[in-house]
Image (tube, grey):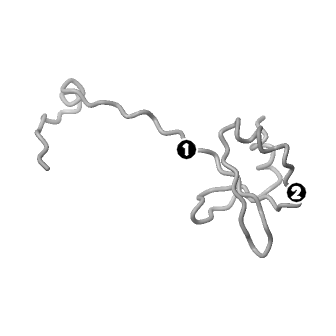
Amino acid sequence: MSLFEELAQSFPLETLAPYGQVLVIPVKAFREEWRKQLEAEGVQVYSNAYMGQTCFFLRKKCRIKPFQKLTSLSLKASGQKKRKLSF
């Protein structure tokens, strides 16, 4: 089990602007030695005020798939016609 998953069992998952879904950990409960392990797990670590106290917000990084080049073959498979784009 990852450290993020372990922390998720003890701390609330909240949806906060502009961060999105984050684990909220009060500054007094956060251990600095967690930071490297969390970042290695693909977790972004932020700090800010939350409900009157300083907290750390832990957010998993979004994994974006690489751009896939459209070819005429993929257009034919989807039933779309090849069109020229004008700008």
* Classed neighbour count for the residue bearing mark 2: other residues with Cα under 10 Å, few (<14), some (14–19), many (≥20): few
Give the x, y percent position of residue 13.
70, 57
Q: Tag 2's secondary structure?
A: loop
Q: Tag 1's secondary structure?
A: loop
**Residue drawn at point x = 62 percent, y = 56 percent:** 21
* Above or below for 23 versus 79: below
Contact (CB < 8 A) between labels 2 and 1? no
Q: Nearer the viewer, residue 15 or 48?
A: 48
Give the x, y percent position of residue 51.
75, 74
Answer with the quarter of the image where residue 27 lies.
Answer: bottom right
Tell me how far mark 2 sits from mark 1, CA to CA. 25 Å
| Identity, as a three-letter code, of the amino acid under mark 1 | Cys
Q: Nearer the viewer, residue 15 or 69?
A: 69
**Residue drawn at point x = 79 percent, y = 67 percent:** 54
Which residue was labeled with disc 2? 29
* Classed neighbour count for the residue bearing mark 1: other residues with Cα under 10 Å, few (<14), some (14–19), many (≥20): few
| Identity, as a three-letter code, of the amino acid under mark 2 | Ala
Indicate which disc, 2 or 1, sits on the residue closer to the N terminus.
2
Which residue was labeled with disc 1? 62
* Above or below for 29 versus 44: below
Residue with the most extreme bottom position: 52
**Residue drawn at point x = 42 percent, y = 33 percent:** 66
Give the x, y percent position of residue 1.
78, 34
